Image (cartoon, rainbow, N blue to C red):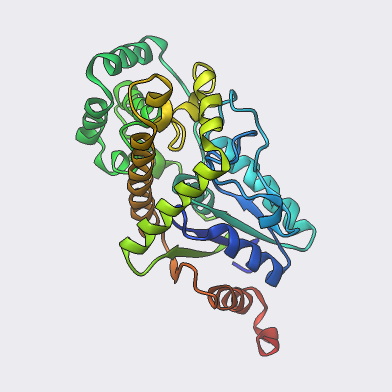
Amino acid sequence: MADKVKVLMLCGPTASGKTALAVMLAKALDGEVISADSMQIYSGLTVGTAAPQPEEMQGIAHHLIGVIPPQQSFSVADWTAAAAEKIADIHRRGKIPIIAGGTGLYLSSLMNGVRFQEEKTDPALREKLREELGREGAEAMHARLMAVDAPYAQTLHPNNTGRVLRALEVYLQTGQTMTERLADSLMPEKPYDVCLYGLNYDSRTELYEKIERRVDIMMEKGILDEARLVYKNRECWHTAAQAIGYKEFFPFFEGTMPLELCVDELKKATRHYAKRQLTWFRRMEGIVWERAADPQAAQRIAQAFLQKALPKADEALI
């Protein structure tokens, strides 16, 4: 592992304080932060994605935030390639790459060195699945995926219809589940020497309180205007239109649900998403858990990282 780039990776459910801790670690280790968030990559969507603002960054360089337009598709393969370039550049300049985010698929794929196969699609099959989605609904299609590939289906919300349909398409086209495909795509050796840390609260109640407070703050910051913009562009902003934080307000814009109920739905959806995030992170190999909002966490993580990163002969200097 001595010749591999050493990377500090920080994950946790939404509202667990990843941004603040990543900044503290970057200051302590002379590092730069790479966002591992599938929505923060898009420009102009800052409130609903909880993208860090300049005052939160505190002068620390952050990468892969707001760099592509919302109408552009951006896959996990695109992100891992972009993140690899950033890691190489940060390391070349003598700084520590710090990956921070809540998109488990991104983090796992980068850490394990997943090699993505060339996407082959069957337009007729894809259209058939979309028609079935229209007739049967998202829950039914998710149940179909659960029947053939439960491990992968459990990582997806039923409303994530893009990935659900893609997994069904791969299975029907090749006979291979997405779980099997991901396993086959792993490199024989992991590309980075990763120190992986996860944030969580002592109780589910505390996490849910933080989530509800975050949604209230988003309302104060104008998430409704941002969601309205997504709604107006929903035909071409496909990813944003399916994202938690925006789609919950669509019934309000359509006049079918009062705003208060939409806010409640957003809080509920975010709580469910946090549960799925934790399920994913707990399966990640080598993860070390820290209590969210613990003021001593940054010091412990930084010290542990330095102990691993420095040569044996220099350990006495820590």
Q: Nearer the viewer, residue 308 or 250?
A: 250
Identify the residue shown where x is 36% and y is 63%.
206
Tell me if residue 246 comes above or below residue 173 in the rendering: below
Compared across the picture, whether 168 is left or right of 44 comes to: left
Residue occupying the point 46% across, 37% down: 245
Q: Is residue 23 visible?
A: yes
Residue 220 left/right relative to 275: right
**Residue 3 visible in image:** no
Q: Nearer the viewer, residue 96 or 174?
A: 96
**Depicted 5 relative to depicted 112: above or below:** below
- Residue that extends furthest to the right in the rendered view of this protein: 93
Q: Position of residue 58 (x, y in %)?
A: 72, 60
Q: Residue at x 45, y 34 (%)?
A: 243
* Furthest residue toward bottom: 316
Q: Quadrant of the C terminus?
A: bottom right
The image position of residue 26, as x and y in percent, is 68, 65
